[in-house]
Image (tube, helix red, strand yellow):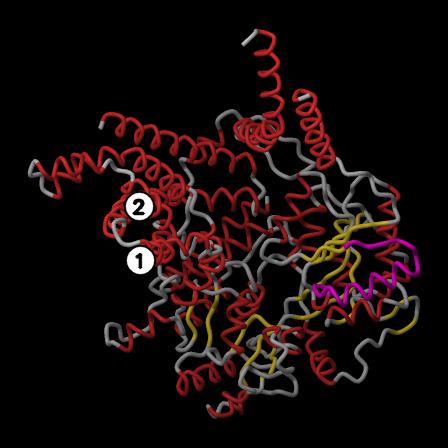
Amino acid sequence: MSPELRRRETVAGYLFLLPSLIFFVGFVVIPMVMCVVTSFFDATMDLNTPDKFIWFDNYIELWQDPVFLKGLTNTLIIVLVSVPFTCIFSLWVASAIYKMREGLLSFFRIVFYLPVVTGSVAVTVVWKWMYNNYYGIFNYVLKNTGIISKNINWLGNPQYALWCIILILLTTSVGQPIVLYVSALSNVDSSLVEAAEVDGATNTQVFWRIKWPQIMPTTLYILIITTINSFQCFALIQLLTSGGPNYATETVMYYIYYTAFKLYRFGYGNAMGVILAIFIGILSAVQFRLAREK
Amino acid sequence: MKKLLSIALALLMVLGLAAIAKPASADAEEITLWTYPIGNWGNEEAVKALTDAFTAETGIKVKVEYLTYTDGDDKVNTALTAKKAPDLIMEGPERLVSNWGAQGYMVNIADLFDDQDKAEINPAALAACFADDATAYEYPLCMTAHCMAINMTAVKEAGAEEFVNTDTHLWTTEQFFNTVKALAAKYGLVGGIYCSGQGGDQGTRALVNNLYGGTFTNAEHTAYTWDDPKNIQALKALYDLEGLDYDPSINGGEEIANFYNGIFKMAFCWNIGQQLNPNSAGTGAGKTANGEDIAFMAFPSEDGNAVLQGGIWGFGIFNNGDDARIEAAKKFILYMADSEHTVDAVRASNYFAARSAVAGNELDIWAGNEIMAEYNKLMPFLGDYYQVTKGWAPARTAWWNMLQQVGASDGSEAAIAAAVADYCAQANEGAK
């Protein structure tokens, strides 16, 4: 290829990239930069008070803010529970169904994927009804089977509320990993599996020695995506509990929203956003590192 | 050819973006109105009839967007920060005056109030629309008093009729407690002190403040005063009352739904709009889902004279820097709230007019409507419009968080007092 042709193709390539690049820069890069910059300001909506540069005051305040610390703790609990559970459960389900005949496999795929494609608001409304203190199905069943004698206020009791949220999160999180694992397991080189079996390897050995290394990239992807989704848990909180009762379901994402859009403290909210991004970045890097070592 | 095509495509996309970023400046022949669901001002058909009439008379078109209380504030704030605010907004002084007005986003419309207007507009509504003597950010259209409701059929079945006066709609704290006790003895569950969020919090505020004469703010609207012992006494009494629980899993709207469906026998989030159309279900005025009678009542107080929380709604203008559009928006306000068309505009709200007359002509908006005439008995009990106190948004959040804390406490006076003191202090931080 002549240099002139290569130059023309390169220019054409960049020009084709330009529209999406403009969107990416305009709606991702610039807001990210503005988020970091604003986090150093006492930025509010007030036009009468100019934003003041306050160095790291927002970041210092964060670590003295009990609501933020509670939100961070709750977020970490959500991540620590939902990420391993989602990965293990979806791998288990995928292992059980991936060899099934096509019709049955499709049925299970649909069953587990349905909550993913159903609107989060619709899913949440149904769960809210099931958890309802007065006429919810959980209380109805538990009372009629004699397990409880008095209705439990699932979402109104600090003891249960966060676990109720996690349960919903799990049901909506496993669909995509199951589909991905089914696909990854189906693509495992069958000749290697057969060779191992001929050599007398047990099912467990086949799984850990042959299949697991081959589905590791999928596992890594699922781990990172699930971690990010768990850190960003927002809609469920917004629709079900508003962070209550007594901050029992407060998460960092919800507190960012509340601080920025209810209290109009944009600088403080952005500082939280930066911290959250750092947490997600560190965890993702650790996951990458561990997976690479494996 | 490929290069040309790619350049053309890229240019098209960039131009498209530019078009999104900066819409063609509309002239004053069209203005935009964003309205919260204030009665039928949230109903497209009703509003269209009003705006069409305005367009026919003035030639100014009105593009309306309907907001909800769930995400309306977020939409407006996003529009403000993006400099895409509507010309007109319809809501109450707590948003228009204390929030967006105080932050410099609204146009001062004090010039719309002449002396006759000031004489005709309800003094409480007028005061709430002014930030100071010379600055107004809202022109009031309608108002009402918030109240509570009881399932009258259930009250009769529980034998508690003697405690309820459906003629005056007033009752004492003792009568209220006796009614709750009777209902609890008959049904177990009577109602809930809802506190999952700020939706409908005017009801819980009014209930707590009225029971023993507590206040929410000082008279100057400079500080939150809900840590006074009378409120603590009320919160403790409610905690101890069988049949009523502090419920952090529901908000005002959900309380209304529970009441309408017969689960609750009392609702604290009520007003004339609900009385006319309970739960917005369209199943008949003053009736629950299964046809039981609903009676509206003032909040109970020791002497039986309630201090009710008011709702005032009207129009404000966002300052978009276009004088022609501001003038057009002012025309719209005067057309709706200060002309012979005010009758229709108020009627659409399902509330009462914020003024007694227009240009000297008495307003008789609800003549012949029995329910409105009955509800009008509560209007003299309208109390101070304290929602204009600085830091209102964080104070509301502190309030429902405080209720959650009280509900989760052991119910001792010390624990309740500690929760109240803590959250009231938080509210006062925002008032500084």
Q: Quadrant of the N terminus of chain A?
A: top right
Residue name at image x 73 percent, y 61 percent: B313
- Residue B59 magenta-drawn? yes
Residue at x 44%, y 31% (from the top left corner): A60
Amino acid type, residue under disc 1 in the picture: Leu
Q: Nearer the viewer, mark 1 or mark 2?
A: 1
Horizontal side, residue A119 vs residue B87: left or right: left
- Label 1 belongs to which residue? A104
Q: Is residue B244 shown above or below A264?
A: below
Q: Is residue B418 visible?
A: no
Q: Which residue is drawn at 79% across and 69% down?
A: B346
Estimate the x, y position of residue B302 in percent, counting from the top left: 55, 76
What stretch of residues is rendered in magenta? B41-63
Q: Which of B74 and B171 is in front in this view?
A: B74
| Residue B372, x across and y down, in percent | 73, 80
Q: Is residue A249 left or right of residue B28?
A: left
Q: Residue sitting at 79 percent across and 78 percent down? A: B366
Magenta region's main secondary structure? Answer: helix
Q: Is residue B430 visible?
A: yes
SS for dot 1:
helix
